[in-house]
Protein backbone atom coordinates (compact mmCIF):
# COMPACT_ATOMS: atom_id res chain seq x y z
CA UNK A 1 0.00 0.00 0.00
CA UNK A 2 1.02 3.67 -0.32
CA UNK A 3 1.04 4.09 3.48
CA UNK A 4 3.45 1.16 3.88
CA UNK A 5 5.70 2.55 1.15
CA UNK A 6 5.80 5.94 2.82
CA UNK A 7 6.67 4.37 6.17
CA UNK A 8 9.44 2.24 4.63
CA UNK A 9 10.87 5.36 2.99
CA UNK A 10 10.61 7.23 6.29
CA UNK A 11 12.51 4.53 8.17
CA UNK A 12 15.12 4.41 5.41
CA UNK A 13 15.54 8.17 5.61
CA UNK A 14 15.94 8.06 9.36
CA UNK A 15 18.51 5.27 9.10
CA UNK A 16 20.54 7.33 6.61
CA UNK A 17 20.27 10.38 8.87
CA UNK A 18 21.42 8.38 11.86
CA UNK A 19 24.30 6.96 9.81
CA UNK A 20 25.37 10.39 8.64
CA UNK A 21 25.25 11.69 12.20
CA UNK A 22 27.33 8.75 13.42
CA UNK A 23 29.90 9.47 10.73
CA UNK A 24 30.17 13.08 11.87
CA UNK A 25 28.33 14.67 8.98
CA UNK A 26 27.24 18.30 9.28
CA UNK A 27 24.18 20.17 7.99
CA UNK A 28 24.73 19.10 4.43
CA UNK A 29 22.12 19.40 1.74
CA UNK A 30 21.48 15.66 1.99
CA UNK A 31 20.81 15.94 5.73
CA UNK A 32 18.49 18.92 5.18
CA UNK A 33 16.66 17.02 2.46
CA UNK A 34 16.20 13.98 4.72
CA UNK A 35 15.04 16.15 7.60
CA UNK A 36 12.46 17.93 5.48
CA UNK A 37 11.28 14.59 4.14
CA UNK A 38 10.86 13.35 7.75
CA UNK A 39 8.77 16.41 8.68
CA UNK A 40 6.57 15.99 5.63
CA UNK A 41 5.96 12.31 6.33
CA UNK A 42 5.30 12.96 10.03
CA UNK A 43 2.73 15.57 9.10
CA UNK A 44 1.10 13.22 6.63
CA UNK A 45 0.97 10.51 9.27
CA UNK A 46 -0.57 12.93 11.75
CA UNK A 47 -3.32 13.77 9.29
CA UNK A 48 -4.16 10.10 8.80
CA UNK A 49 -4.60 7.57 11.61
CA UNK A 50 -2.32 8.88 14.38
CA UNK A 51 -4.11 12.14 15.14
CA UNK A 52 -5.57 10.97 18.44
CA UNK A 53 -2.50 9.09 19.60
CA UNK A 54 -0.14 11.96 18.95
CA UNK A 55 -2.56 14.43 20.46
CA UNK A 56 -2.67 12.45 23.71
CA UNK A 57 1.11 12.08 23.93
CA UNK A 58 2.53 14.99 25.92
CA UNK A 59 6.05 16.38 25.53
CA UNK A 60 8.58 13.80 26.71
CA UNK A 61 6.07 10.92 26.75
CA UNK A 62 6.54 7.83 24.58
CA UNK A 63 4.30 6.11 22.09
CA UNK A 64 4.02 2.31 21.83
CA UNK A 65 7.42 2.00 20.13
CA UNK A 66 9.21 4.00 22.84
CA UNK A 67 9.73 7.11 20.67
CA UNK A 68 8.95 10.43 22.26
CA UNK A 69 6.41 12.60 20.54
CA UNK A 70 8.96 15.37 20.04
CA UNK A 71 11.81 13.32 18.56
CA UNK A 72 12.70 11.78 15.22
CA UNK A 73 13.82 8.20 14.74
CA UNK A 74 17.42 9.42 14.42
CA UNK A 75 17.21 11.17 17.80
CA UNK A 76 15.60 8.07 19.25
CA UNK A 77 18.48 5.90 18.05
CA UNK A 78 20.96 8.42 19.51
CA UNK A 79 19.20 8.24 22.89
CA UNK A 80 18.88 4.43 22.78
CA UNK A 81 22.58 3.85 21.94
CA UNK A 82 24.38 6.93 23.32
CA UNK A 83 27.74 5.14 23.48
CA UNK A 84 27.91 5.27 19.67
CA UNK A 85 27.95 9.09 19.81
CA UNK A 86 29.87 9.45 23.11
CA UNK A 87 26.87 11.36 24.42
CA UNK A 88 27.48 11.52 28.19
CA UNK A 89 24.12 13.08 29.05
CA UNK A 90 22.23 10.47 27.06
CA UNK A 91 24.28 7.69 28.65
CA UNK A 92 23.31 8.89 32.10
CA UNK A 93 19.66 9.12 31.06
CA UNK A 94 19.79 5.62 29.58
CA UNK A 95 21.29 4.19 32.79
CA UNK A 96 18.63 5.91 34.89
CA UNK A 97 15.85 4.55 32.70
CA UNK A 98 17.23 0.98 32.69
CA UNK A 99 17.54 1.09 36.50
CA UNK A 100 13.97 2.25 36.73
CA UNK A 101 12.78 -0.58 34.53
CA UNK A 102 14.71 -3.12 36.60
CA UNK A 103 13.19 -1.83 39.82
CA UNK A 104 9.66 -1.84 38.41
CA UNK A 105 10.03 -5.40 37.11
CA UNK A 106 11.33 -6.89 40.36
CA UNK A 107 9.38 -10.05 41.19
CA UNK A 108 8.49 -10.44 44.86
CA UNK A 109 6.87 -13.87 44.58
CA UNK A 110 8.54 -15.70 41.67
CA UNK A 111 7.11 -18.87 40.17
CA UNK A 112 9.22 -21.70 38.70
CA UNK A 113 8.07 -24.45 36.36
CA UNK A 114 10.10 -27.70 36.50
CA UNK A 115 9.20 -30.37 33.91
CA UNK A 116 12.15 -32.74 33.49
CA UNK A 117 11.16 -36.24 32.32
CA UNK A 118 14.07 -37.85 34.16
CA UNK A 119 12.80 -38.35 37.73
CA UNK A 120 16.37 -38.30 39.07
CA UNK A 121 17.08 -34.85 37.64
CA UNK A 122 13.58 -33.59 38.42
CA UNK A 123 13.98 -34.48 42.10
CA UNK A 124 17.40 -32.79 42.30
CA UNK A 125 16.07 -29.55 40.79
CA UNK A 126 13.07 -29.59 43.14
CA UNK A 127 15.44 -30.09 46.07
CA UNK A 128 17.44 -27.09 44.92
CA UNK A 129 14.31 -24.94 44.80
CA UNK A 130 13.33 -26.20 48.27
CA UNK A 131 16.20 -24.03 49.55
CA UNK A 132 14.50 -21.01 47.98
CA UNK A 133 11.31 -20.68 50.09
CA UNK A 134 10.09 -17.57 48.28
CA UNK A 135 9.79 -19.50 45.03
CA UNK A 136 6.56 -21.28 44.21
CA UNK A 137 7.26 -24.38 42.11
CA UNK A 138 4.91 -25.93 39.53
CA UNK A 139 5.50 -29.27 37.82
CA UNK A 140 2.81 -29.46 35.15
CA UNK A 141 3.60 -27.92 31.78
CA UNK A 142 0.91 -25.68 30.24
CA UNK A 143 -0.26 -26.03 26.62
CA UNK A 144 2.27 -24.61 24.19
CA UNK A 145 1.69 -21.53 22.06
CA UNK A 146 1.27 -22.29 18.37
CA UNK A 147 3.98 -20.87 16.15
CA UNK A 148 1.38 -19.14 13.97
CA UNK A 149 -0.61 -17.61 16.83
CA UNK A 150 -0.64 -13.86 17.20
CA UNK A 151 1.00 -13.14 20.54
CA UNK A 152 -1.77 -10.72 21.49
CA UNK A 153 -4.46 -13.32 20.90
CA UNK A 154 -2.90 -16.03 23.09
CA UNK A 155 -4.44 -16.29 26.53
CA UNK A 156 -2.04 -16.18 29.44
CA UNK A 157 -2.75 -19.71 30.63
CA UNK A 158 -0.17 -19.78 33.43
CA UNK A 159 2.15 -17.14 34.80
CA UNK A 160 5.67 -18.29 35.64
CA UNK A 161 9.08 -16.67 35.53
CA UNK A 162 11.46 -19.61 35.20
CA UNK A 163 11.18 -22.89 33.32
CA UNK A 164 13.60 -25.79 33.68
CA UNK A 165 12.37 -28.51 31.37
CA UNK A 166 12.97 -30.58 28.27
CA UNK A 167 13.55 -28.68 25.04
CA UNK A 168 10.17 -29.72 23.65
CA UNK A 169 8.43 -28.45 26.81
CA UNK A 170 9.61 -24.85 26.39
CA UNK A 171 6.97 -22.46 25.08
CA UNK A 172 9.24 -20.95 22.44
CA UNK A 173 6.50 -18.94 20.73
CA UNK A 174 4.96 -17.36 23.80
CA UNK A 175 4.94 -13.61 24.22
CA UNK A 176 6.64 -13.90 27.61
CA UNK A 177 9.62 -15.79 26.15
CA UNK A 178 9.97 -13.38 23.26
CA UNK A 179 10.00 -10.43 25.67
CA UNK A 180 12.57 -12.07 28.00
CA UNK A 181 10.11 -12.36 30.88
CA UNK A 182 10.78 -16.09 31.35
CA UNK A 183 14.15 -17.70 32.02
CA UNK A 184 14.37 -21.04 30.22
CA UNK A 185 16.81 -23.95 30.47
CA UNK A 186 17.58 -24.33 26.75
CA UNK A 187 18.71 -22.25 23.81
CA UNK A 188 16.28 -22.35 20.91
CA UNK A 189 18.93 -22.55 18.18
CA UNK A 190 22.02 -24.54 19.27
CA UNK A 191 22.48 -26.88 16.32
CA UNK A 192 25.99 -25.57 15.72
CA UNK A 193 27.03 -27.04 19.05
CA UNK A 194 25.09 -30.29 19.37
CA UNK A 195 24.81 -31.50 15.75
CA UNK A 196 27.98 -33.48 15.17
CA UNK A 197 28.18 -32.64 11.47
CA UNK A 198 27.73 -28.89 11.94
CA UNK A 199 30.16 -28.73 14.86
CA UNK A 200 32.76 -30.71 12.93
CA UNK A 201 32.53 -28.32 9.98
CA UNK A 202 32.74 -25.24 12.23
CA UNK A 203 35.81 -26.56 14.04
CA UNK A 204 37.52 -27.67 10.82
CA UNK A 205 37.18 -24.14 9.42
CA UNK A 206 38.20 -22.56 12.73
CA UNK A 207 41.34 -24.68 13.04
CA UNK A 208 42.28 -24.01 9.42
CA UNK A 209 41.91 -20.28 10.07
CA UNK A 210 44.25 -20.39 13.08
CA UNK A 211 46.49 -23.22 11.91
CA UNK A 212 49.72 -21.29 12.51
CA UNK A 213 48.60 -19.55 15.69
CA UNK A 214 46.85 -22.11 17.89
CA UNK A 215 47.16 -25.77 18.74
CA UNK A 216 44.59 -28.10 17.15
CA UNK A 217 42.00 -29.43 19.59
CA UNK A 218 39.50 -31.37 17.46
CA UNK A 219 40.33 -34.55 15.51
CA UNK A 220 40.43 -34.26 11.74
CA UNK A 221 36.83 -34.78 10.53
CA UNK A 222 34.89 -35.06 7.30
CA UNK A 223 31.12 -34.68 6.85
CA UNK A 224 29.25 -37.05 4.51
CA UNK A 225 25.74 -36.13 3.38
CA UNK A 226 23.70 -38.69 1.41
CA UNK A 227 20.29 -38.34 -0.24
CA UNK A 228 17.34 -39.13 2.02
CA UNK A 229 16.71 -42.87 2.29
CA UNK A 230 13.41 -44.46 3.25
CA UNK A 231 12.04 -47.98 3.22
CA UNK A 232 8.59 -48.96 2.01
CA UNK A 233 7.43 -52.51 1.44
CA UNK A 234 11.02 -53.76 1.59
CA UNK A 235 11.98 -51.39 -1.19
CA UNK A 236 14.43 -48.51 -0.69
CA UNK A 237 13.89 -45.04 -2.07
CA UNK A 238 17.02 -43.13 -3.00
CA UNK A 239 16.41 -39.73 -4.52
CA UNK A 240 13.02 -40.91 -5.77
CA UNK A 241 14.26 -44.18 -7.30
CA UNK A 242 12.47 -47.31 -6.09
CA UNK A 243 13.98 -50.51 -7.40
CA UNK A 244 15.19 -53.32 -5.17
CA UNK A 245 17.43 -54.81 -7.89
CA UNK A 246 19.14 -51.46 -8.55
CA UNK A 247 19.56 -50.70 -4.86
CA UNK A 248 23.19 -51.73 -4.66
CA UNK A 249 24.38 -49.70 -7.63
CA UNK A 250 22.27 -46.63 -6.76
CA UNK A 251 23.47 -46.63 -3.18
CA UNK A 252 27.08 -47.16 -4.24
CA UNK A 253 26.87 -44.16 -6.58
CA UNK A 254 25.27 -41.97 -3.91
CA UNK A 255 27.88 -43.06 -1.37
CA UNK A 256 30.81 -42.34 -3.69
CA UNK A 257 29.41 -38.90 -4.51
CA UNK A 258 28.96 -38.08 -0.82
CA UNK A 259 32.47 -39.27 -0.02
CA UNK A 260 33.92 -37.19 -2.85
CA UNK A 261 32.03 -34.06 -1.72
CA UNK A 262 33.29 -34.53 1.84
CA UNK A 263 36.89 -34.09 0.72
CA UNK A 264 38.00 -37.28 2.48
CA UNK A 265 41.36 -38.23 0.91
CA UNK A 266 40.80 -41.95 1.30
CA UNK A 267 42.25 -44.87 3.23
CA UNK A 268 45.96 -45.54 2.79
CA UNK A 269 45.39 -49.29 2.57
CA UNK A 270 42.07 -50.84 1.68
CA UNK A 271 41.65 -54.53 2.46
CA UNK A 272 38.97 -54.96 -0.18
CA UNK A 273 40.80 -53.31 -3.09
CA UNK A 274 38.20 -50.58 -3.61
CA UNK A 275 40.49 -47.72 -2.69
CA UNK A 276 39.60 -44.13 -3.28
CA UNK A 277 42.57 -42.40 -4.88
CA UNK A 278 44.53 -40.24 -2.46
CA UNK A 279 45.27 -36.78 -3.88
CA UNK A 280 48.96 -35.83 -3.99
CA UNK A 281 48.58 -33.01 -1.45
CA UNK A 282 47.24 -35.47 1.10
CA UNK A 283 49.71 -38.27 0.46
CA UNK A 284 52.25 -37.15 3.02
CA UNK A 285 49.55 -36.75 5.68
CA UNK A 286 48.25 -40.26 5.05
CA UNK A 287 51.54 -42.04 4.36
CA UNK A 288 52.21 -42.73 8.02
CA UNK A 289 48.67 -43.91 8.67
CA UNK A 290 48.70 -47.35 7.09
CA UNK A 291 46.47 -48.78 9.78
CA UNK A 292 44.65 -45.53 10.62
CA UNK A 293 41.21 -46.16 12.08
CA UNK A 294 38.34 -43.74 11.60
CA UNK A 295 35.19 -43.50 13.66
CA UNK A 296 31.85 -42.99 11.89
CA UNK A 297 29.12 -41.13 13.80
CA UNK A 298 25.58 -40.30 12.70
CA UNK A 299 25.16 -36.57 13.26
CA UNK A 300 21.81 -36.76 15.03
CA UNK A 301 22.26 -39.61 17.52
CA UNK A 302 23.68 -39.81 21.05
CA UNK A 303 24.78 -42.53 23.52
CA UNK A 304 27.01 -44.23 20.93
CA UNK A 305 24.01 -45.21 18.78
CA UNK A 306 25.01 -46.05 15.21
CA UNK A 307 28.76 -45.57 15.73
CA UNK A 308 31.18 -47.77 13.78
CA UNK A 309 34.95 -48.09 13.52
CA UNK A 310 36.27 -48.42 9.97
CA UNK A 311 39.61 -48.60 8.17
CA UNK A 312 38.52 -49.27 4.58
CA UNK A 313 36.12 -47.86 2.01
CA UNK A 314 34.04 -51.03 1.99
CA UNK A 315 33.70 -50.97 5.79
CA UNK A 316 32.64 -47.35 5.63
CA UNK A 317 30.08 -48.01 2.88
CA UNK A 318 28.66 -51.03 4.69
CA UNK A 319 28.35 -49.13 7.98
CA UNK A 320 26.36 -46.32 6.36
CA UNK A 321 24.24 -48.77 4.40
CA UNK A 322 23.39 -50.65 7.62
CA UNK A 323 22.23 -47.49 9.45
CA UNK A 324 18.52 -46.83 9.87
CA UNK A 325 16.42 -44.29 7.99
CA UNK A 326 16.64 -41.68 10.75
CA UNK A 327 20.42 -41.82 10.79
CA UNK A 328 20.60 -41.69 7.00
CA UNK A 329 18.39 -38.58 7.02
CA UNK A 330 21.19 -36.63 8.69
CA UNK A 331 24.88 -36.18 8.11
CA UNK A 332 27.61 -38.65 9.03
CA UNK A 333 30.85 -37.50 10.60
CA UNK A 334 33.97 -39.46 9.74
CA UNK A 335 36.43 -38.56 12.49
CA UNK A 336 40.02 -39.63 12.99
CA UNK A 337 40.16 -42.18 15.79
CA UNK A 338 42.36 -40.88 18.61
CA UNK A 339 44.69 -43.54 20.09
CA UNK A 340 43.80 -43.42 23.80
CA UNK A 341 45.84 -43.07 26.96
CA UNK A 342 45.16 -46.32 28.81
CA UNK A 343 44.64 -46.67 32.56
CA UNK A 344 44.44 -50.17 33.99
CA UNK A 345 44.63 -51.38 30.37
CA UNK A 346 41.31 -49.75 29.57
CA UNK A 347 40.23 -46.83 27.42
CA UNK A 348 38.48 -43.85 29.01
CA UNK A 349 37.21 -40.41 28.09
CA UNK A 350 36.43 -37.28 30.08
CA UNK A 351 32.88 -35.98 30.50
CA UNK A 352 32.93 -32.25 31.19
CA UNK A 353 29.84 -30.20 31.97
CA UNK A 354 29.48 -26.83 30.28
CA UNK A 355 26.96 -24.21 31.40
CA UNK A 356 26.10 -21.45 28.95
CA UNK A 357 24.12 -18.46 30.19
CA UNK A 358 22.59 -15.45 28.52
CA UNK A 359 24.33 -13.77 25.64
CA UNK A 360 26.94 -15.30 26.19
CA UNK A 361 28.95 -16.55 29.21
CA UNK A 362 30.48 -20.01 29.53
CA UNK A 363 31.17 -21.83 32.79
CA UNK A 364 32.84 -25.23 33.20
CA UNK A 365 32.23 -27.54 36.16
CA UNK A 366 35.51 -28.03 38.03
CA UNK A 367 34.99 -31.76 38.58
CA UNK A 368 35.55 -33.82 35.43
CA UNK A 369 34.22 -37.36 35.18
CA UNK A 370 36.46 -40.15 33.88
CA UNK A 371 34.29 -42.74 32.09
CA UNK A 372 35.94 -46.10 31.39
CA UNK A 373 35.28 -49.09 29.22
CA UNK A 374 34.83 -52.23 31.31
CA UNK A 375 36.64 -54.29 28.65
CA UNK A 376 40.43 -54.44 28.07
CA UNK A 377 41.58 -52.35 25.11
CA UNK A 378 44.70 -54.16 23.96
CA UNK A 379 44.00 -56.77 21.29
CA UNK A 380 40.32 -55.85 20.93
CA UNK A 381 38.96 -56.11 17.38
CA UNK A 382 37.24 -53.12 15.86
CA UNK A 383 33.87 -54.84 16.13
CA UNK A 384 34.35 -55.31 19.89
CA UNK A 385 32.78 -51.93 20.48
CA UNK A 386 32.60 -52.13 24.28
CA UNK A 387 36.38 -51.91 24.37
CA UNK A 388 36.47 -48.92 22.02
CA UNK A 389 33.31 -46.93 22.85
CA UNK A 390 33.43 -45.69 26.42
CA UNK A 391 29.95 -44.20 26.57
CA UNK A 392 28.44 -45.52 29.80
CA UNK A 393 25.18 -46.36 28.01
CA UNK A 394 27.22 -48.78 25.87
CA UNK A 395 28.73 -50.61 28.85
CA UNK A 396 27.18 -53.47 30.81
CA UNK A 397 27.11 -52.11 34.36
CA UNK A 398 25.81 -54.89 36.62
CA UNK A 399 26.99 -53.90 40.10
CA UNK A 400 28.17 -51.02 42.30
CA UNK A 401 31.72 -52.23 41.68
CA UNK A 402 31.15 -51.98 37.92
CA UNK A 403 29.75 -48.49 38.44
CA UNK A 404 32.91 -47.40 40.25
CA UNK A 405 35.19 -49.02 37.64
CA UNK A 406 33.17 -47.38 34.89
CA UNK A 407 32.89 -43.84 36.26
CA UNK A 408 34.71 -41.74 38.81
CA UNK A 409 36.10 -38.26 39.27
CA UNK A 410 39.13 -37.53 37.14
CA UNK A 411 40.92 -36.45 40.33
CA UNK A 412 40.47 -40.01 41.64
CA UNK A 413 42.60 -41.56 38.89
CA UNK A 414 46.04 -40.66 40.27
CA UNK A 415 46.68 -44.18 41.60
CA UNK A 416 45.51 -45.66 38.28
CA UNK A 417 48.05 -43.48 36.49
CA UNK A 418 50.82 -44.63 38.80
CA UNK A 419 49.87 -48.31 38.58
CA UNK A 420 49.62 -48.09 34.77
CA UNK A 421 53.11 -46.62 34.48
CA UNK A 422 52.07 -43.41 32.71
CA UNK A 423 53.48 -41.35 35.61
CA UNK A 424 56.26 -42.02 38.11
CA UNK A 425 54.76 -40.39 41.20
CA UNK A 426 51.40 -39.31 42.58
CA UNK A 427 52.66 -35.74 42.48
CA UNK A 428 53.30 -36.07 38.75
CA UNK A 429 49.81 -37.53 38.28
CA UNK A 430 48.26 -34.56 40.07
CA UNK A 431 50.21 -32.14 37.88
CA UNK A 432 49.10 -34.03 34.77
CA UNK A 433 45.47 -33.76 35.85
CA UNK A 434 45.75 -30.03 36.46
CA UNK A 435 47.44 -29.56 33.09
CA UNK A 436 44.67 -31.48 31.31
CA UNK A 437 42.01 -29.45 33.11
CA UNK A 438 43.69 -26.19 32.15
CA UNK A 439 43.86 -27.29 28.52
CA UNK A 440 40.20 -28.36 28.53
CA UNK A 441 39.16 -24.94 29.86
CA UNK A 442 41.03 -23.21 27.04
CA UNK A 443 39.59 -25.57 24.41
CA UNK A 444 36.03 -24.95 25.61
CA UNK A 445 36.52 -21.19 25.53
CA UNK A 446 37.80 -21.43 21.96
CA UNK A 447 34.98 -23.78 20.94
CA UNK A 448 32.31 -21.44 22.35
CA UNK A 449 33.90 -18.51 20.54
CA UNK A 450 33.91 -20.45 17.27
CA UNK A 451 30.35 -21.78 17.55
CA UNK A 452 28.76 -18.54 18.77
CA UNK A 453 30.09 -16.68 15.74
CA UNK A 454 27.95 -18.82 13.42
CA UNK A 455 24.28 -18.54 12.49
CA UNK A 456 23.69 -22.10 13.70
CA UNK A 457 23.89 -20.91 17.32
CA UNK A 458 21.78 -18.04 18.65
CA UNK A 459 22.19 -16.80 22.20
CA UNK A 460 19.53 -14.93 24.16
CA UNK A 461 19.59 -13.13 27.49
CA UNK A 462 16.87 -15.25 29.09
CA UNK A 463 18.35 -18.66 28.21
CA UNK A 464 20.80 -21.01 29.86
CA UNK A 465 21.72 -24.63 29.24
CA UNK A 466 23.95 -27.42 30.54
CA UNK A 467 25.83 -29.45 27.92
CA UNK A 468 27.96 -32.58 28.25
CA UNK A 469 31.28 -32.41 26.39
CA UNK A 470 33.48 -35.44 25.71
CA UNK A 471 37.28 -35.27 25.57
CA UNK A 472 39.97 -37.84 24.82
CA UNK A 473 43.56 -37.88 26.08
CA UNK A 474 46.15 -39.49 23.81
CA UNK A 475 49.34 -41.28 24.97
CA UNK A 476 51.28 -38.00 24.62
CA UNK A 477 48.82 -36.25 26.98
CA UNK A 478 47.29 -34.17 24.19
CA UNK A 479 43.63 -33.40 24.83
CA UNK A 480 41.01 -33.64 22.07
CA UNK A 481 37.40 -32.47 21.94
CA UNK A 482 35.24 -35.26 20.51
CA UNK A 483 31.67 -33.89 20.66
CA UNK A 484 29.09 -31.90 22.60
CA UNK A 485 25.71 -33.22 23.77
CA UNK A 486 22.53 -31.45 24.78
CA UNK A 487 20.50 -32.72 27.74
CA UNK A 488 23.28 -34.98 29.10
CA UNK A 489 22.08 -37.95 31.14
CA UNK A 490 22.89 -36.77 34.66
CA UNK A 491 21.43 -39.89 36.27
CA UNK A 492 24.36 -42.00 35.03
CA UNK A 493 26.56 -40.49 37.73
CA UNK A 494 24.96 -42.89 40.22
CA UNK A 495 24.45 -42.53 43.96
CA UNK A 496 28.14 -42.18 44.85
CA UNK A 497 28.62 -39.12 42.63
CA UNK A 498 25.14 -37.68 43.02
CA UNK A 499 26.51 -34.87 45.18
CA UNK A 500 28.45 -33.54 42.18
CA UNK A 501 25.30 -33.30 40.10
CA UNK A 502 23.33 -31.86 43.01
CA UNK A 503 25.95 -29.14 43.57
CA UNK A 504 26.07 -28.36 39.85
CA UNK A 505 22.31 -27.90 39.59
CA UNK A 506 22.25 -25.77 42.75
CA UNK A 507 25.06 -23.57 41.47
CA UNK A 508 23.36 -23.30 38.09
CA UNK A 509 20.32 -21.84 39.81
CA UNK A 510 22.53 -19.47 41.77
CA UNK A 511 24.24 -18.24 38.60
CA UNK A 512 21.22 -17.77 36.35
CA UNK A 513 18.87 -16.38 39.00
CA UNK A 514 21.41 -14.07 40.60
CA UNK A 515 22.20 -12.58 37.19
CA UNK A 516 18.55 -11.59 36.77
CA UNK A 517 17.82 -8.36 38.67
CA UNK A 518 14.17 -9.35 39.05
CA UNK A 519 15.06 -12.16 41.45
CA UNK A 520 17.97 -10.70 43.38
CA UNK A 521 17.40 -10.83 47.11
CA UNK A 522 14.88 -13.68 46.92
CA UNK A 523 17.14 -16.04 48.87
CA UNK A 524 19.43 -15.42 51.82
CA UNK A 525 22.31 -17.87 52.45
CA UNK A 526 21.31 -20.40 55.10
CA UNK A 527 24.59 -22.22 55.71
CA UNK A 528 28.35 -21.81 55.56
CA UNK A 529 28.42 -23.54 52.16
CA UNK A 530 25.76 -21.19 50.85
CA UNK A 531 27.74 -18.23 52.18
CA UNK A 532 30.77 -19.44 50.21
CA UNK A 533 28.69 -19.75 47.04
CA UNK A 534 27.26 -16.27 47.50
CA UNK A 535 30.85 -15.00 47.60
CA UNK A 536 31.64 -16.65 44.28
CA UNK A 537 32.92 -20.05 45.43
CA UNK A 538 30.93 -22.44 43.24
CA UNK A 539 31.60 -25.67 41.37
CA UNK A 540 31.93 -23.65 38.13
CA UNK A 541 34.79 -21.74 36.55
CA UNK A 542 34.05 -18.95 34.09
CA UNK A 543 36.03 -19.59 30.89
CA UNK A 544 34.45 -17.25 28.34
CA UNK A 545 32.36 -14.11 28.21
CA UNK A 546 31.36 -12.39 25.01
CA UNK A 547 32.05 -8.66 25.04
CA UNK A 548 30.40 -5.80 23.25
CA UNK A 549 27.17 -7.52 22.29
CA UNK A 550 23.81 -7.06 23.97
Image (cartoon, rainbow, N blue to C red):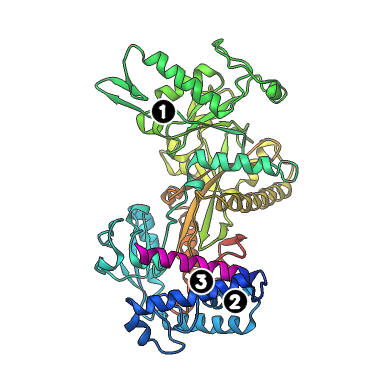
Cα separation between marks 3 and 2: 24 Å
> How far across and down, in percent of the image, does residue 180 sit?
42, 68
Cα separation between marks 1 and 2: 51 Å
Quadrant where the C terminus lies?
A: bottom right
Residue at the spot of label 3 = 515
Residue under the image location 58 percent in, 64 percent down: 549
Res 392 seen here: yes
Q: Crowdedness of circle 2 by 10 Å Cα count: few (<14), some, many (20+)? A: some
Residue at the spot of label 2 = 82
Q: Crowdedness of circle 1 by 10 Å Cα count: few (<14), some, many (20+)? A: some
* Quadrant housing residue 113: bottom left
The relative height of residue 190 versus residue 72 in the rendered view (above or below) is: above
* Quadrant housing residue 82: bottom right
- Please state which of the two labelled residues, at mark 1 or mark 2, is closer to the viewer: 2
In the image shown, does 342 or 135 lie closer to the viewer? Answer: 135
Residue at the spot of label 1 = 227
Span highlighted in magenta in the image: 1-19
In the image shown, does 111 or 4 lie closer to the viewer? Answer: 4
The relative height of residue 379 versus residue 464 in the rendered view (above or below) is: above
Look at the image and say whether residue 5 sits in the magenta stretch. yes
Res 517 seen here: no
In the figure, is residue 60 to the left or right of 273?
left
Cα separation between marks 1 and 3: 45 Å
Amino acid sequence: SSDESEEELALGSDALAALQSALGGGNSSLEELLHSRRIMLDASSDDDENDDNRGNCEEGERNNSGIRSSESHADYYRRLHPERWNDRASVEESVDESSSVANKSKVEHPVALVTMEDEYVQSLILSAFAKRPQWRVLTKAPPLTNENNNFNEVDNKMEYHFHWGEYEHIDWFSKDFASDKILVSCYYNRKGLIRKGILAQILEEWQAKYRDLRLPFAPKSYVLTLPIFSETNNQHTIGGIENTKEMSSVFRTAFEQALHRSGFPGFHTDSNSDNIIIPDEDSREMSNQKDQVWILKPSITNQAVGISLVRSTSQLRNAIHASDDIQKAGDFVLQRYIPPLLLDGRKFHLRVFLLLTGNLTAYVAKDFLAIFSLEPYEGANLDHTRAHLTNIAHQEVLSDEDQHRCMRRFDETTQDMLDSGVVKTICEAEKRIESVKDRVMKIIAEMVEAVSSELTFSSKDNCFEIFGLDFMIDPDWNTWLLEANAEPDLSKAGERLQYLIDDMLMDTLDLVIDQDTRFQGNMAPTSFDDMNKSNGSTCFVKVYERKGRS
